[in-house]
Amino acid sequence: MDVVSDAVAAIRTGRPQAARTRRTAPWGLRFPADPGTGFHVVLQGRCWLLSAGCDPVPLSAGDVVLVPHGDEFALADAPGSELVEVTPDMDDTWVPAPDASAGPLTVLMCGSYQLDRAGAHPLLAELPAFLHLPRRVGGRTALNAVVDLLGDELDQRRPGTDAAIPALLDAMLLYILRAWYHDHAPRTGGGWAAALDDPAVGSALQHMHAEPATAWTVELLSRRAGMSRAAFSRRFTELVGRPPMAYLTWWRMTTAGRILRDDADAPLRAVAERVGYTSEFAFNRAFKREFGTTPGAYRRRDPAHA
């Protein structure tokens, strides 16, 4: 997989969930801090995104908001509206029923992705508190299409809807990240947008992610990148934030954690070999250094409490 897909897959647990709600003005919903990653789509009407320390952000139909770190925030028909705290049950009754007022109607699709932040990729960690992607006529056609399909599935449940919604939500998360990195992420200086755009560093990252079991060295990676060893190591460290071999070890451990979480029957020796370790002892030592626990204990723990 590519680096962005890997970054998401490394921390995803459970099934993403979504629900629609119809609000007639005046209304306001406060979303408390949450360990997952929340998303909100305005399907119809307008509203405001409210967050402490930030100016209110106007949202229109088709706009998408991602809350990558689960920060507290609010949505309301107007900045001064009274807020009701949401206790999400993640079904179609997760918010209070709309009142009978004749105010303007807003239809929202809200939900969350459940994540195991113990293996959070720095590509996701450097995202801002909120990603706001306005709908553009003629732009972001893939993201717009997924939003439309999700709205349709939630509006008219049909055979296959329970399978379609999680798949569409997974696709929407990747399209949101792709759109944000393409349109908003800085590409000068350090950071992951610059790292992914850099031919040499981006190529090295792709090799590490595609083949974590390969016996990569700085010399081999720099040769693949067409750079001297010293220049490559310096450039990689500048953009990624850690030296090539340190990143490779971290990624191998993160990959091992994902395998342990998803495959309860995989022998530890097999997991070690899949991430480049011929010695189970060396693998256990590296894993404990990264996660603070042994691979066996990590497998038994509940990811939701990481």
Image (spheres, rainbow, N blue to C red):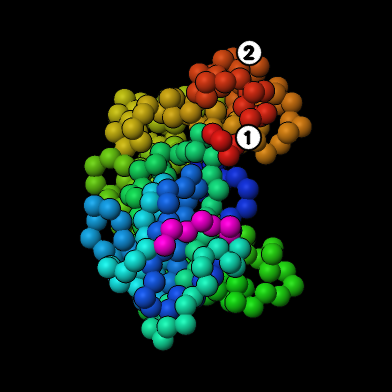
Could you tell me how far apart the alpha carbons at marks 1 and 2 are, in whole angstroms?
Answer: 24 Å
Residue numbers of the magenta segment:
84-90
Type of secondary structure dominating the magenta stretch: loop
Amino acid beneath label 1: Asp
**In this rendering, does residue 37 appear at all?**
yes
Amino acid beneath label 2: Phe
Residue 145 is a magenta residue = no
- For residue 89, side relative to residue 238 (left or right): right
Residue 199 lies, in percent from the top left, at: 37, 45
Q: Quadrant of residue 76?
A: bottom left
Residue 89 is a magenta residue = yes
Residue beneath the point at 60% across and 30% down: 256
Residue 129 lies, in percent from the top left, at: 34, 50
Residue beneath the point at 39% across and 71% down: 27
Q: How many marks?
A: 2
Residue 175 vs 204, above or below: the answer is below
Residue furthest out toward the right:
265
| Numbered badge on residue 281 | 2
Residue 81 lies, in percent from the top left, at: 32, 69
Residue beneath the point at 43% across and 25% down: 246
| Numbered badge on residue 302 | 1
- For residue 193, side relative to residue 290 (left or right): left
